[in-house]
Amino acid sequence: MARPEQVLLLEPQHELKFRGKRGGPGFFVLSFLYFAQCPFSDVVTTYLKLSNPTDRNVCFKVKTTAPRRYCVRPNSGIIDAGTSINVSVMLQPFDYDPNEKSKHKFMVQSVLAPPDMTDMEGVWKEAKPDELMDSKLRCAFEMPVENEKTHDAESNKMSSGLLKSESSTLPPKSMSSTLDDGEVKKIMEECKRLQMEAQRLREENKQIREDDGMRMRKSNVMSPQHSSLGMKKDEGWSVRTMALIVLFFVVGVIVGKLVL
């Protein structure tokens, strides 16, 4: 029994291409003074767009013949009617052999979701074979393009500081870097954030020192005041006591004379 035609629109339709990076940082193989650059020594990401042109929701799954080699996000889900979704397919680092042809394949499987669906896994389990639709894609590994002048300009800026000490002995080709624009932007943003954090800590430290100095000066000023107030208070008590004693004595003398 022939399977129904795939309702989802795939972009690309037949092949997922993974382009290697030139001279991934930290993945040079040293052989005397020669650096052999592996184009797939870092994660390489490509994207698969799935569009649903129908008026019904569609459940999908993305499967591969090499699940340990690829990381797919999301690898399953629901595409609402008239919408699309981008699936990230990340090729994990591996030792690339240009003589070996890729036999890896991907399959996008889909099924129309029932209107009252509450459990997506239940839909897959209950789906009949004639309700399942699938599309297959092959994988292709591409070598880096040598004439990427813009990419080389950015990578040379990033690698000049890292490889300054080795520039006199390394061949010119080894000065290239695989940091793409996104990675460069992330690094610059992280540096800016760290600089702002350091500035904030310096300001907080300065404020703390100023507050401590004010408290110490205030305590030094308040200490003599407290001591002088204590002495005045003691003197006040002693004067009052003497006045009361004298008053009682005078009263006692007057009362005694009247009695006698």
Image: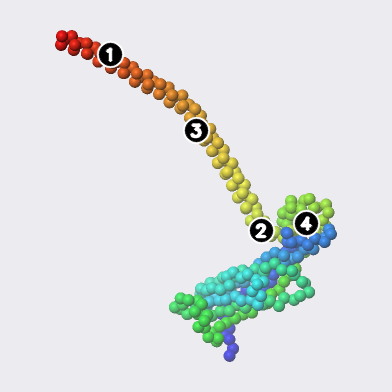
Task: Give me the residue at 59% from left, 81% from top.
Answer: 134
Between the residue at mark 4 and the residue at mark 2, the CA separation in whole angstroms equals 17 Å
Tell which circle, 4 or 3, labels the residue nearer the N-terminal end. 4
Tell which circle, 1 or 2, labels the residue nearer the N-terminal end. 2
Tell which circle, 1 or 4, labels the residue nearer the N-terminal end. 4
Q: Residues within 10 Å of mark 2 (few under 14, many from 20)?
A: few
**Residue 106, percent across and down?**
64, 77
Task: Give me the residue at 74% from left, 54% from top.
Answer: 159
Task: Give me the residue at 40% from left, 24% from top.
Answer: 230
Secondary structure type for disc 2: helix
Tell which circle, 1 or 3, labels the residue nearer the N-terminal end. 3
Q: Residues within 10 Å of mark 4 (few under 14, many from 20)?
A: many
Q: Which residue is mark 2?
A: 183
Which labelled disc corresponds to residue 84? none
Q: Which residue is mark 4?
A: 175
Between the residue at mark 1 and the residue at mark 3, the CA separation in whole angstroms equals 46 Å
Which labelled disc corresponds to residue 246? 1
Q: With respect to residue 165, does 13 lie above or below?
A: below
**Residue 50, percent across and down?**
58, 73
Which mark is nearer the camera, 4 or 3?
A: 3
